[in-house]
Structures are given as structure tokens and as C-alpha cells.
Amino acid sequence: MAIPFIDLGIQRERIGAKIEDAVLKVIKHGAYIMGPEVKAFEADMSAFAGAKHTLSCANGTDAIELILLSLGVAKGDAVFVPAFTFVATAEVVPMTGAEPVFCDIQADTYNIDPAKLEAAIQAVQAEGRLKPAAIIAVDLFGQPADYPALSDIAKKYGLHLICDSAQGFGGTIDGRQPLEWCVATATSFYPAKPLGCYGDGGAVVTNDDALMEKMISFRVHGGATPTDAATMNYTHEAKYLNVRIGMNSRLDSIQAAVLIEKLAIFGEEIELRQTVARRYNELLGGKVISVPHVRDGYVSTWAQYTIEHESRDALQAHLRAKGVPSAVYYPIPLHQQPGYAMFTSGTGDLAVSEAKSKTVISLPFSPYLDTATQDEIVAAVLSFENQG
Ligand SMILES: Cc1ncc(COP(=O)(O)O)c(C=O)c1O
């Protein structure tokens, strides 16, 4: 059987019957949008994340945009993002009128480098065109960014610190979730994510009451919040009083029903992911250019298992010939993407991002990857190494 890049089949065998029952229940009760499953899932997410609030939404991209809009990020603001991430992290910034400022990453974790971030903030201040407003840190491949250091910088310069945990939701630093340092964490439930649904979905977790109230409004067309309504003489349904320009970004009840079942086993799956990653590291360590490095005290959710090789494209072709799928996340850093060339503020020194985009390659990964299949993948990688 062909090796899948991300195997969702074994999880389906495990909880498929429960998911089918839950989905059928939604089909029968008929509250397809914002039904009881959505509320129940939001409560489960808050409990899992140790957060006061969860706002579910249509996808992880909207989740980040909802945070920015609700914080009031707008034209004239600078939002600092890593240059090496999925495009959605930066894409949402111009949607608010603000500009992304690209920062370089740490070579060992692929996450935004606090020292380079600070240099970029100072470069923007010196340029004087934009006002530094927010930092979006990304937990790339599942490992949390260096939130303690990032939070010190955010406080020093008066910036909002936002966590894009589309790949890393559930990851921790010394047992603490990124939300302990950030105003809000965004995540994605795209099916291939560590916590994925059966379509598109996303969420924001936060402890901030005022932010939550604004996000509820932006999520559904900028409808009046209780605070808005209290100051206006309006007696009809709040959703028909549109106080701000919002969007339509609701999570379907069917997806929430799927997610309730998946979240129930997510903690256990994060543990299983550690075992699979540890075994890859043992088998490949010292034999390829680099295996992933997780810092002491950090727990990654291993959205990807990413190695590096100087002949990356040849390795990928070799793996393909051996029936082993792989993926390159990401072949072009964001500052080199044609659509983003106009955003030039910052230090311009993005050498680590540029170098990594040429060497990274991700191998098949799932919490249920069996040792025989893993051995086959490792043998294919090593056979490339050994061919000289
Ligand atoms: C780092 C990162 N941010 C944001 C997103 C956007 O999530 P979605 O695809 O659910 O919009 C993704 C998804 O691939 C991602 O990897």
C-alpha cells in the first residue's frame, strides 16, 4: 500500500463510528450553523487551552485576521511576522490596511528570532513611516516560538503579541501554553493539522473579555456587541445593527461535532507524536544534515517532521522514486514571494529564512505511524545518503 504523507485513516478507524453518530445527530437536529455542537466545542477548547474564551470560526486565516481587526490594527501600522511561514500569517495583515514587516528566524527552531525581531522594530521606528503595532509569532512545524523572550520585547515596545498556532496548537513551554504570554492564539482545523476537522475550520483562544466581544462582532458581519447596543437606541435584533465592517466566518455545527470527538483524544495523540518523532530522530540523527531540534522544556505537536539536506530536491526525487511522499514547507520565503515584494520595511537581513527554504524537506508523519512504515521511510532516506 502507498505510504500516505499524513495518514488520517487510522484515526478514523479508531473514532470513526463516534464521529459518524455525532454528524448524523447534527443532520437530524438541523441547527447547521452555530448549533449546540459549536458552543460545546468552544467550551471544550477553552478547557483544553486553559483559556477563558474560545471563538470558533471558518478557518485559521480568518482566526488571525479576526484578532488583528479586533485589536484595531489598521492602516499605518506595522505587524512583524517571520519571513519563513505559511503565507496566511502575513496575508491577513494587508487585509486590515496594515503592512507586514518580515523578520528572520532562528536556525534551530525555524521560529521568529527575538534579536532580529527587535532589530526590525528599531528599523521601522527609524524609518518613521509605520507605527509598530503587533507581532505574530508562528509555532512552525509544531514547536512553540520563544514566547518568554518575545513577550519581553512586546512589552518593551508596547506591541500586541499574537500566536499563530495553526501548526502548534497544544504545544507547551515548561508545561505552559503560548496564551500565557500572548493576547490571543489562533489555530487552524484544516484536516492535515494536528487537530483537524473534515473540512475548513479555525479558532481563537483568549483570556481578554473586550477582545472576545469585538471578535464575536467581526465574525458575523460586524453586528452590535452588548456594549455597542447599550449606547444606542435600537430595539431590533443586534445582528441587524452593523457597527463595524466584519466578515462571515462561522464554524459549521458538523465540523464542531467532528472536533469534539477529535479533541477528546488530542492529548493522547500529542504523546504518540513524541514517540514517532523520537524514533525518527534516533534513526536519522547524525546521518542527514539535520534532524529537528526541540528546545529543552518545549513540547512540539509535530505538525511536520522536517529534516534538512543540501541536495534537497534530489533527495525529494529519490524518495518519490521509492514511493515515499514528502513535502517542502516552504520553498520561497515570504519576502521573495511576488505578491509580497512591495513590503520592504525592516532590516532586510533574512539570510536564515532564505537558506532554510533551500534545504528543508518534511517526511510522512502521523501519531499512528507504525514502525515498519517508518523503517521503510528511513531506509529510503538513508539509501540516498549511501549512494554517495
Ligand atoms: C502557520 C499557518 N498559519 C495559518 C494557516 C491558515 O490556516 P487555514 O488553512 O485554516 O486558513 C496555516 C494553514 O496552513 C498555517 O500553517
Image (spheres, rainbow, N blue to C red):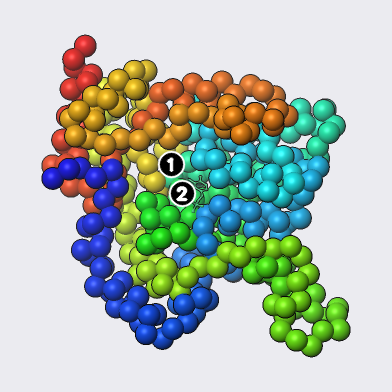
Q: Pick whichever, 42 or 335, lies toward us.
A: 335
Q: Pick whichever, 163 or 172, lies toward us.
A: 163
What's under tag 1, amino acid-wise?
Phe
| Residue lying at 58% horizontally and 26% vertically, measured from the top left | 336
Q: CA distance from mark 2 to mark 1?
A: 7 Å
Q: Quadrant of the C terminus?
A: top left
Res. 265 mark: none
Residue position marked by numbered label 1 in the rendering: 141
Disc 1 within 8 angstroms of ligand 1 (CB): no
Q: Pick whichever, 267 or 86, lies toward us.
A: 86
* Pointer 1 local density, CA inside 10 Å: few below 14, some 14–19, many at least 20: many
Q: Quadrant of the N terminus?
A: top left
| Residue lying at 51% horizontally and 58% vertically, measured from the top left | 59
Left or right relative to 145: residue 282: left
Q: Pick whichever, 122 or 83, lies toward us.
A: 83
Q: Is residue 260 above or below residue 165?
A: below
Residue located farthest toward the bottom when viewing the structure as drawn: 235
Image marks 2 and 1: residues in contact by CB distance under 8 Å: yes
Disc 2 within 8 angstroms of ligand 1 (CB): no
SS category of the residue bearing label 2: loop
* Pointer 2 local density, CA inside 10 Å: few below 14, some 14–19, many at least 20: many
Residue 116 % position (x, y):
64, 28
Residue 228 % position (x, y):
80, 75
Q: Is residue 360 visible?
A: yes
Residue 200, picture quadrant? bottom left
Residue position marked by numbered label 2 in the rendering: 168
SS category of the residue bearing label 1: helix
| Residue lying at 82% horizontally and 81% vertically, measured from the top left | 230
